[in-house]
Image (cartoon, helix red, strand yellow):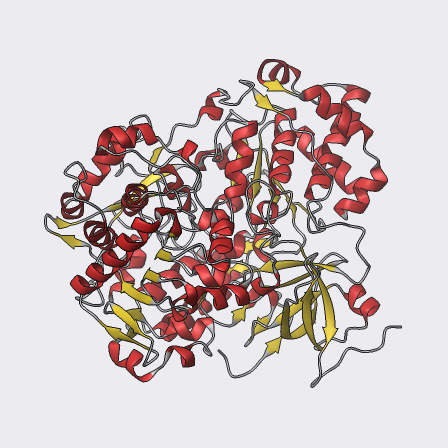
Amino acid sequence: MDSHIRIRHYEGPAGGWGSVQSLFRNALRSRVRLATIDALAHQNKPEGFACVSCAWAKPARPHVAEFCENGAKATFWELTGKQALPEFFATHTVTELRTWDDYSLEAVGRLTHPMRYDHLLDIYEPVSWDLAFEEIGRELRAIRAEDPKKVVFYASGRASLEASYMYQLLARLYGNNNLPDSSNMCHETTSVALPEVIGQPVGSVRLDDFAHADAIFFFGQNTGSNSPRMLHQLQEAAKRGCVIVTFNPLKERGLERFTNPQNPVEMLTGGETKISHRYYQVKAGGDIAALTGMCKALFERERASGGILDHGFIAEHCHGFEDFRVFCEEQSWGVLEKESGLKRTEMEEAAEIYGRANAVMGVYGMGLTQHKLGVTTVQSLVNLLLLRGNIGRPGAGICPVRGHSNVQGQRTVGISEKPDLVPLDRLAELYGFEPPREEGLSTVDACRGILNGEVRAFIGLGGNFLRAVPETGPMEDAWPKMRLTVQVATKLNRGHLFNGDVAYLLPCLGRLEVDMQATGPQTVTVEDSTACFHASKGRARPISEHLLSEPAIIAGIARMTLPENPQVPWEEWVADYSKMRDAIEATWPDIFKDFNTRMWMPGGFEKPLSANRREWKTKTGKANFKVPEALSASFDSGMHDDVLRLITLRSNDQFNTTVYGYRDRFRGVEGTRMVIFLNPADMARLGVAEGGNVRLEAVAADNVTRTVSGLRAVSYDIPEGCCGAYYPECNVLIPLSQHAERSKVPAAKSVPVRLVAEGGGLQLRAAE
């Protein structure tokens, strides 16, 4: 953390010299290895490696530097020269390490040795791999004899397709479908919403569609921090005249203007590209009302002059149109304005832009999915696209921007708690066992099981589960009550500091490192946000000779846990990953035909998408209009005026729970993450002084006290009634019960909270 706190308005664009300076600062801080220069040159390139940060598409014709600011930080973070050696753990107790912040824990460096937690000494101690696998296997066998459903197999979004396939097979051979993953925390809403309306669980947009779109409508997605390479496509689209319209509560710099760091002229002259032609600051949870208002305006224009809706497409390909039309026409403009936070004229203006465009893309992020009515919100965006046939043609479609590097791919190869999404009969045929058929535990369900003591063991394939989930305090208290906890990781994080009776911290190779196995260096694969598969080959020397690959660790646990099965060649798969890909192809032949050959295609090879062919694999056999359940995806709008809607945010110096530093350049915050962004009118109404010390208290029906203290009030351009603060620091405010209906994604984008004055420093001033 920086030694001082400074909060000031940032005037610059996304990218530009600010991005370059941030990279140099992070490179020095991470003490990167010499291999980093070579790595950056091959990042997201054919024959190179897939970035370990976001899942944005890898183009067939990449830029010279096909990485963004956050992608480079992720590379620096993994190729750091710092090491968390056994000597470090010998001199720092786990209790002491719990007092460290997220940044300081990961900044210790790469894990180098398998470690076992000693409860008596309160430290991690080195252990051999053989002993680790033997004890883990013994503990898992004992729990399996009691009830195999008491073990959770969690997967982080960056595990490769190969590791993910092995992991899901391990869980099912063990006897359960308890396979929660990162998707449960972000885009599971997409996986529930889209199959009902277009018949597939992923988006329909490919990278080439950006070159053909006439308009791009953004909802709830911060491109500049979460997927900055996407700014290349947006800049090119804006320059050729594509109209970009954004709906988001906060003004995000990447969707306002951008200076391309790879363009010498722009860098030297200070040139920048305006990204969004219109920017509508919708209220948190107000997207359903905004989308309904746009559709209502389109119906009104259709009645007045005709020629707006694609009646041919609707008649041939859609179901439920008439019910949806009636619903939209019955809505009051006054109610739509109140729930969306937008004016009628703004919704009509957006509808006019949409109506003039022949090919429109709908792009969205967790600003839509992380709401109680997230499924309805995503389907409302699809409603808008269907009105003019904007799915299944070039330049058009629905585009969920996934988060972590391979989170979508994990679902493709079986990491799912939902058995109906996995070809269980095929797994049974290939591996000679009867897979479990009942639904497993999602992330929310796993948390409940840990809290009530039903879960006896947690195996974590990467990630920072305990820091990412809601109910932080109770979860930390309940975690040590489990019998076994195993964490596979590259770096230390807070989730490793709460341990079961038997606890292991197992270091794995990073994706950027050479993965040498019996048949030579290995390659892994990932799937990007546009449903394309890519090969990824590490190039750097491993930081430690004691590291194992994720597939080797999974196989080691499996061999010591499960009865011998000659049809499951764990050792052969680890020796030669191409045999693993043959197994993936045998399980999903329609998706992975000629997998080992096609994985090297520049730009990746495409997953078949039925909606792109206008084949609708839904219950009706058509694309379905869905009448919204309500106009607000937020909590009850009838709450008291002092209740605000909290939006949890990431800074541009972090990715997911990984904090690279304490400079949120775009929001002008330096040296701290303990801030709350407030609308000036709300500050005046509630009597909050700029820089005042406040705490947030969650407002929940269970009356449980959930608070975050020590926040500094910052005046910010955010809609009235809304406020923003950083994730994961504010996860403690989210009740486990507050999740998206049906998808169970934590509803972190509209958390009801109150502000309370704190003693010391600047105080709340009396309301006028």
Q: Is residue 107 left or right of residue 734?
A: left
Which quadrant of the structure image shows residue 748? Answer: bottom right
> Can you give x and y, in whole percent of width and height, for residue 651 in the image?
54, 63
Which quadrant of the structure image shows residue 590? Answer: top left
Residue 402 showing in the rendered view? yes
Q: Nearer the viewer, residue 28 or 482?
A: 482
> Can you give x and y, in whole percent of width and height, for residue 169 in the image?
29, 41
Q: Quadrant of the C terminus?
A: bottom right
Q: Is residue 223 left or right of residue 62?
A: right
Vertical order, 124 against 614 (above or below): below
Which quadrant of the structure image shows residue 294? Answer: top right
Q: Nearer the viewer, residue 372 or 447?
A: 447
User: Which residue is drawn at the image coordinates 35% and 30% (left, top)?
Assistant: 423
| Count of all numbered marks drawn on residues in the image | 0
User: Which residue is drawn at the image coordinates 86% and 73% (left, top)?
Assistant: 767
Q: Nearer the viewer, residue 325 or 257?
A: 325
Q: Is residue 454 left or right of residue 552?
A: right
Residue 603 showing in the rendered view? no
> Can you give x and y, in whole percent of width and height, for residue 376 in the image?
64, 37
Vertical order, 181 against 323 (above or below): below
User: Which residue is drawn at the image coordinates 23% and 51% (left, top)?
Assistant: 561
Vertical order, 425 against 470 (above or below): above
> Can you give x and y, in whole percent of width and height, for residue 230 in the image?
48, 47
Residue furthest to the front = 146
Q: Is residue 119 left or right of residue 673?
A: left
Residue furthest to the right = 768
Vertical order, 356 against 53 (above or below): above
